[in-house]
Every structure is written in C-alpha cells, then in structure tokens.
Image (cartoon, rainbow, N blue to C red):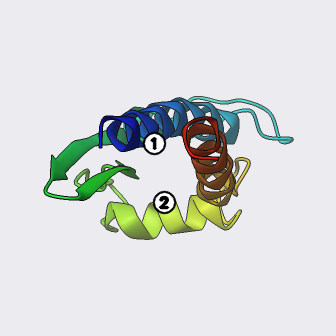
Amino acid sequence: MKQMEAAVTETVDDSFKDLHTNVDSFYNSPQGRYSRTGQLAESPQHDGIKSGGDTVTGGISLDTAYRYDPSGRDTQTIYGYAEDGGLIGKGGFWAKTKEDFERNIKRAFGKRFK
C-alpha cells in the first residue's frame, strides 16, 4: 500500500507541475504574448491524495470559480474557448496535461510494480 501511495503521489505531483507548464504555454501563443487577467495561470489545483482501505486516489484540476467580467460568461466556458483555440493563445493545454498524466502514471507505477 505504501508503494501504491508513493506512485499516486509522484504521479499527481509531476502532473501538477506539467499542468502549470502547459497552462503557461497558453500565454506564449504564436500571436504573441499580451496582457491578460492571468486567472488561467492561477487556476491549476492539486486536489490532494486520499487513501483508505485498499484505494488511493489523487488528482489535479483547474479552478473554475472565477467569473470573467465584463464577458459575464462562466469560467468553464472561457477555459473551453481557450482549450479549443477559440481565444488568442495556444490551446490544447488540458489535452497535453492528460497525455502527461498518462505518461506519469506509467513511469511512477512502472518503477514500483514490474
């Protein structure tokens, strides 16, 4: 169980770093960097590691509680536009993070469970 907890912790911690890197890449778009609210850059969250019985879980997410003014749109909608390339910026940051998460799972668990 300790090995499982260590593998999940490593996976989530590494993926959290990747999420920050991927979100930061949004701001370095081919159209150039410009001033923004920075809310997306501040939104990555580490959801913690929980263990009990024979289960260990952990995760990362984007904080979507912020409300964009003057657009009046919810944050999930704005982040969706950003992810899909519908805003000036480099989209695909969440898709890249999911790929990184899978890579991190294979690496962390592969080291411990062969």
Q: Which disc is residue 79 wearing?
A: 2
Mark closer to the chain start, 2 or 1: 1
Q: In the rendering, at what x and y percent does residue 89 appear?
A: 70, 47
Q: Is disc 2 placed on a helix, strand or loop?
A: helix
Question: In the image shown, does 61 or 63 lie closer to the viewer?
Answer: 61
**Residue appearing at x 83%, y 41% in the figure:** 31
Question: In the image shown, does 46 or 26 lie closer to the viewer?
Answer: 46
User: What's the amino acid at mark 2?
Assistant: Tyr
- In the figure, 113 relative to 24: above or below? below
**Residue appearing at x 66%, y 35% in the figure:** 27
- In the figure, 65 relative to 26: above or below? below
Q: In the rendering, at what x and y percent does residue 15 appear?
A: 53, 39
Question: In the image shown, does 84 or 4 lie closer to the viewer?
Answer: 4
Question: In the image shown, does 60 or 30 lie closer to the viewer?
Answer: 60
Quarter occupied by residue 81: bottom right
50 lies left or right of 42 = left
Compute the Cα span from label 2 to label 1. 8 Å
Q: Which disc is residue 40 wearing?
A: 1
Q: Quadrant of the N terminus?
A: top left
- In the figure, 39 relative to 69: above or below? above
